[in-house]
Image: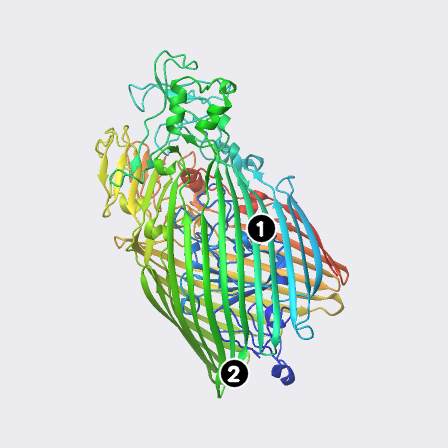
Amino acid sequence: MFKRTQLCSALAIAFGGGLAVASLPASAQQTLQRVEITGSNIKRTDTETASPVQVMTRDDIEKTGKQSIQEVLRGITADGQGSIPSSFSNGFASGSSAVSLRGLGVNSTLVLVNGRRMTTYGLADDGTRSFVDLNSIPLEAVERLEVLKDGASAIYGADAVGGVVNVILRKNYTGASIGASYGQASRGDGQTTRAFGTVGFGNLDSDKYNVFLSLEASQQKNIWSVDRGFVGESDLRPYGFYNTNNGELRPWLGANATINSPFGVTRNMPVPGSGQRVNVVGCGANVSADTGLCLYNPLVEQEVQPAIDRINLFGRGTLQFSPNLSAYLEVGYFNTKSRANGTLGANNDAGVYLPGDPLNPVVFHDPMVLPAGHPDNTFGVDRVLGYRPAELGGRDQRTNNEVLRLVQGLQGQAFGWDFDIGAAYIKSRLVNDNYGYIIYDRMQEALNNGTYRITSPNLTDPSVIAHISPTLTNVPTSSIKSLDIKASRELMSLPGGGLGVALGAETRWENANTPPVPFTDTASIVGLGYSAFSAKRRVTALFGEVSAPVTKWLELSAAARYDHYSDFGDSTTPKLGFKLRPIDQVAIRGTYAEAFRAPGPAERGGSSFGFTSFGILSQGDPNIKPETAKSYTLGVIAEPLAGTSLTVDYWKIDRKNEIVQADPALIIPANQCQLSCNGSDPDHPNLISAQLPGAQPNSFLYYDDQGNLVTVTGFYTNASKTKTDGIDLELRHRMNLGSAGKLTAQANWTHVRSFRRTDAFGVEREYAGTHGPIVLSAGAGTPKDRASLSLTWDRGPYALTGVVNYVGAIKLIDHKGEMVTDEGDGTVLDETNGLLYNYAGGGLDCASYDLSGNKWKGNCKLPSFVTFDLFGKWSPTKNLDINFSIQNVFDKKPPLDPYLVLTYGINYNQTWHQSGAVGRFFTVGAKYTF
């Protein structure tokens, strides 16, 4: 009942990991092809291994209507918090996308191409977490996707903690095909154009060679936030929330207004923080009734979707010397260019990093001053200036990432062994340009000599602007060189089949170099985080695996791998598995695996300085240890009816020695002032211009000349552990409707039962169903449930697929049981996110309250989000396919996320609700095969 082929059109793979529809005849079973499945190096005919593997064929991918690999993979229900959508256009790793299986982070998901590692993106997530950019993998060349959803370090080495994504590209192709598609949002923007073609010649059986080339080019245009209703609005009072425009009072951060705006807000110098604030530039009637200041919506420059251009070229040649020996060469060039637009930059900052002074690593620039003699200063005295210079444009970022992938090898059979010997070279080169940032000293100098004008920016000489705000370019690179060999065979016959064995060895050289953005290493740039690291290491590994069908109903498997890292030492990881088949229609499977994640280059020797409501400096520790994990799975595979396949798997992962960056929650001592510490609160000391030790060793807190906490510093440490568990379900059913065609239904559901982290102080917090942990997920949250349900109708030349996508509700708290402290002035101090306003009290804390002081939407929840997609295909001839898709058919809007409004200034959840912000999206395309 479980014997199947691995061909794309075979029943087993059409069910993507479920059981075959019916038993194959004996003659068919004798000719089954043995193939390698992700998670095992042993070729086999039974593709149901002890490990849970989700498979998506080219046909499955096509039916999603997605236009890139990153869109397809991010739709997998096992993708959790910490993943990176392309909509994160203004972070450290702008222009990229990554998947985070089980919510354990992008650096704990191993991404392979044809079973071999890809090099990492030149910029790290939050300046810390290295990952493979999904934008650098071509869609047209993909044969199938295999997602292994348990630990796999015993097979693949480091980083396979949450699981493995293996992108299988075509191995051979004969003929030619071309195609194109065009899409745009219902509002007329976000246009996406894609063209592709593949040509191949040579038959391995008759010609003894095959060569093919696949070319793909796409262009995605941007979508502005202001064109998406509340997504681009800062006055959120119509939605029951606050007015978050600059110049308006921000009660959740105290009574002060945010003063940086394009209107040149100034304040008196003698009384810092309490002087009169006035506008240098007029703004008509757009003035706050509470502050008298001009109002500015900082989201006018923000994007829902950045512009991305891709060119992907992939080719493979295979030369067959004999039936038992062939050589292959794979060549890939993948180019991604992104253009992300950000909000206007401010002229003042909350501290910048100075790596050249380890004793005083944070520099605080004095507030900029509009001198009394400046032609735009009508006050007759020096005034402190808070200004967002619109004439410099937004803080925009342009990236140009080039990835070169070369793989060559020999494969065949010798002495009863199937072997594969390969050599690979993969290199990424990223050109990263940043615009609209201010060099502090240069702008203050231009204000002092009057050459920089505020009321009449057109009077400022362009050379002055270019001097103050030059293009800031750095060129990160990363590369992998590797040699590997693996071989497998059946050693002997057992009652249940052949005893399979695999052995292998690998050595690779990893190199990562991310230089700092110019001027961030001299504490000169205002508002731009610092990230820099450079590291080389060599990794050698030996691995082995055995699969033993000891009886017709029991198969046991085991694997082990030894890795030696030149920079931190050794790791040995085992894996055990079983598959029990009491009857033909049911199998029970399970695994135990150990895994590890090697410290990244930033964590061992780099530094990262970024901003939330204050600066956070994380410094590398060369003695950092690897993260380790143990994972468990237990599942049932069943075919209760002919044509029905069901898998249910319980999974659990325990990860220890987690490497965490400087975490304010761990550094700031209990009851220590987190915002304004100017002595106005008797419970908080006067901390004006103070430097205090933090709660962790070698950590510090810095307060400015007004007593505001502006920076915390600390080292990367092995400080935490995480335990997470849940259930995966996959159900497929195929029904023959006779002359009416056939129906295929598929349901995928991932339920996160718990996600518990224990910090360095032994405090355990539960994050399942909440908006945290911020330190890992940028506030995306950990929904307990993700699900998708698809139904496909095929009849002759017609096919129609509908897909329902579901993301569960998220509580607007950082973690369960979060507490607050009443400040006695109408606000409370939240232990994670700072001040809250109008707290109504009673029961569970909430990070967001409406204008009436009630928990947001009455129950402190970001609601569940459901969208419906539609895909159709018509094949008028055997050579021509015409297709269309509608993403988010009913134009479902994203819910307002007040938690992200208060913490990041973003009105919706980009990780889970991006399709709602984009809105209804139409795509039409065609493909012709010659």
Are there few (<14), some (14-19), or many (20+) residues within 10 Å of tag 2? few
Secondary structure beneath dot 2 equals loop
Which of the 4 image quadrants contains residue 260? top left
What mark, if any, has residue 908 been given in the picture? none
Question: What type is the residue that disc 2 sits on?
Answer: Gly
Question: What type is the residue that disc 1 sits on?
Answer: Thr
Secondary structure beneath dot 1 equals strand
Instruction: Relative to 809, say whether 827 is above or below.
Output: above
Residue at the disc numbered 2 = 416
The picture places residue 695, in percent across and down from the top left corner, at 23, 45
Answer whether residue 205 is visible to the viewer in this image: yes
Answer whether residue 101 is visible to the viewer in this image: no
Quarter holding the C terminus is bottom right
Instruction: Relative to 528, say whether 728 is above or below.
Output: below
- Distance Cα–Cα, label 2 vs label 1: 52 Å
Answer with left or right where residue 117 lies relative to residue 31: left
The picture places residue 179, in percent across and down from the top left corner, at 70, 54
Q: Nearer the viewer, residue 520 or 298?
A: 520
Query: Looking at the image, which residue is at 49% across and 44% down?
Result: 431
Between marks 2 and 1 in the image, the one whose residue lies nearer the viewer: 2
Residue at the disc numbered 1 = 867
